[in-house]
Image (tube, helix red, strand yellow):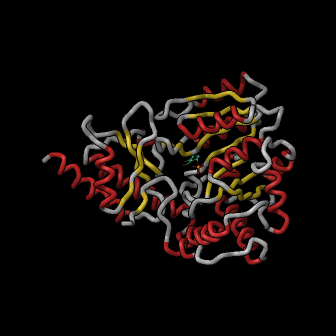
Amino acid sequence: MKSYKLLTPGPLTTTMSVKAAMQFDRCTWDDDYKQITRKIRRQLLAIAGVSPAEYTAVLLQGSGSFGVEAVLTTAVGPAGKCLFITNGAYGERMVKMASYMGLCHTVLAMPCNQVPAAADIEKILAGDAAITHVALVHCETTSGILNPLAEIAQITKAYGKILIVDAMSSFGGVEIPVQELGIDYLVSSANKCIQGVPGFCFVLARIDLLQQCEGNARSLVLDLYDQWRHMDGDGKWRYTSPTHVVAAFSQALDELEAEGGVQARQQRYQASNDLLRTRLKELGFAAYIAEERQSPIITTFLFPDAAFCFQDFYQHVKERGYVLYPGKLTDSDTFRIGNIGEIYETDIQQLCEIIAEYMRRRQT
Ligand SMILES: Cc1ncc(COP(=O)(O)O)c(C=O)c1O
């Protein structure tokens, strides 16, 4: 099979050294392996810039959605009520999870290309004292929009609510002042901006809040409290852990540090994203999200005209070494290009040449 680079929002293209870290079969009982888990947990707190006395990092088997559901079922107790702020598929997925588990909730739903107004959130919080938690997606990967986290955090905290953030596609690639903003639970996964491979997710949680969550979970395997208690013992995971993925993630974290941390990674992503949007605009592709709301992670582009065939376009680009992503919007014809992972400006330049060639061919 011909190889290609992934221009997707994760799983993404990883370095050879991250892949190489998986070439050894580790024992879950052995202290060498437990030390890797302990190291990862410390590093996650460090890159989030939070105090280890106030926050803990809990790793959990499964993809990102498992982490989101674990937080909802563990953090929102039987007497709790969660306000979900949504503007895309991942926000809607949280609402679906809440419905499945019978969690009391309310929703502020926005169109995919709009962010919620502070006044609307405030109105809901002021009018419903039963709300205990507010949950939102930071970078809505559905469209690539970056939600105004600082603004929403400020209102949430002013009303004394617990803040849950799905930072799946932004953590590690966009600076998030977790503690300063008062984020109580943040969820992300191994195969996003830390640039590991898929297989587990993680939660950064305020220790004092998690301590109060014993017995809340409506699911055994998604009980974040129990997972934390177990992992906090000697570093061994509750149930079988994805050993190869964990080793790769440890390597990926070291590489993030070597790159210069989240700030440097954000700069790289931003430069690639700026270049991508500028060049594609010249080639006739309009971005779906307004520039000031666009994340440096993934961009949604509208089809240039009614005759545009994504499948044909995709195949042309794939044969030349890059894989794109279909759109996820229901009301517009779009496709997406991610620029996270082991991707540099040279890749974006090459991609744009490939796309330019495709557009020239279409005209002949
Ligand atoms: C913002 C966001 N939330 C949740 C998810 C779900 O993660 P997973 O597909 O790993 O379950 C994704 C996946 O891309 C995402 O981007």
The residue most toward the front is 1
Closest to the observer, 29 or 166? 29
The residue most toward the top is 127
In the rendered image, residue 11, in percent from the top left (x then y), is placed at 52, 57
In the rendered image, residue 263, in percent from the top left (x then y), is placed at 54, 61
In the rendered image, residue 304, in percent from the top left (x then y), is placed at 28, 40
Quadrant in which residue 334 is drawn: top left
Is 182 drawn above or below residue 16 in the view shown?
Answer: above
Quarter of the picture containing the N terminus is bottom left
Is 69 drawn above or below residue 240 in the view shown?
Answer: above
From the viewer's perspective, tell me whether residue 93 is left or right of residue 283. right
Quadrant in which residue 242 is drawn: bottom right
- Residue lying at 83% horizontally and 60% vertically, measured from the top left: 230
- Residue lying at 71% horizontally and 29% vertically, measured from the top left: 105
The residue most toward the left is 364
Number of numbered labels in the structure image: 0
Closest to the observer, 317 or 36? 317
Closest to the observer, 269 or 12? 12
From the viewer's perspective, tell me whether residue 45 is left or right of residue 282. right
- Residue lying at 29% horizontally and 46% vertically, measured from the top left: 281
Is 33 drawn above or below residue 107 in the view shown?
Answer: below
From the viewer's perspective, tell me whether residue 305 is left or right of residue 199. left
- Residue lying at 60% horizontally and 69% vertically, measured from the top left: 248
